Image: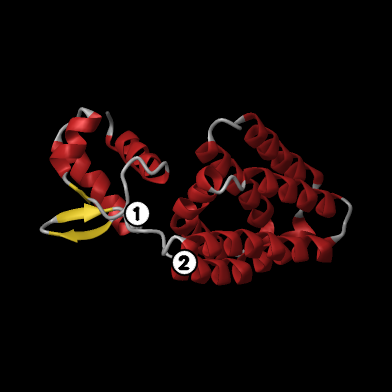
Amino acid sequence: MQKADLYLQLRDDIRRRRWPAGRALKQQELADYYQTSRIPVRDAMSRLAAEGWLVSAGKASLMVPPLSATEAQELCLIRSQLEPLALRQALPQLNQAILGAAEDCLNAADAAANDPLLQGELNWQFHQLLYQPCAMPMLLQLLQQLHLKVAMYLGFQQVELGYGKKSAAEHRALLQHLREGRHQAALDLLQQHISAAANALQLHLQHRGG
């Protein structure tokens, strides 16, 4: 298995909760599981640790961090400020070609109903397409980094909370607002979309002691 492939596989398995939060992960254990040597495992783990997917577990080992209601709330606050800003700045440049490509992402996500993680990636591509015309490269870079951070939470929402259908319906409504020129309605819906998902996740994590 190539290094990049192992990184992606390990990241996706973390999102699928294949490796439970809080349990120390050893390089040899992962090398045996993925049938590779310890060197690519070490490199993949180092990259995931740098991105926040893994944290120190002591004694030179790493673990998947528990999902945190407090962190989920903080991420929501950041997203609710940055994503509407990106969309607002992108509005004058949105055209039918961009909106058509965004709809293609939603159609592909609907077709991936049995793969929640792929759905999550396609949903992010949908958002990315809408934000890209904002012509603010630093903001887009921040949003990309933020997406990497929230990806684990979004995967959890898709898999354990069954939030996919509600999210898909809101994406369709957002796209319709944009096509019909209801820009303020689109901005308001985006804000609600982010906040409602975060509130559902935060309540669930608080209930289970996250």
Q: Quadrant of the N terminus?
A: top left
Depth check: 40 or 73 in front? 73
Is any part of residue 135 visible from this angle? no
Is any part of residue 169 visible from this angle? yes
The amino acid marked with disc number 1 is Trp
Vertical order, 139 against 153 (above or below): below
Q: Position of residue 117 (x, y in %)?
A: 50, 40
Secondary structure found at label 1: loop
Depth check: 205 or 114 in front? 205
Q: Position of residue 131 (x, y in %)?
A: 65, 57
Q: Quadrant of the C terminus?
A: bottom left
Q: Position of residue 153 (x, y in %)?
A: 48, 54
Q: Residue at x 53, y 33 (%)?
A: 115
Query: Disc 1 or 2, which lies upstream in sequence?
Result: 1
> What residue sits right under mark 1 in the picture?
53
Quadrant of the rendered image containing residue 137: bottom right
The amino acid marked with disc number 2 is Ala
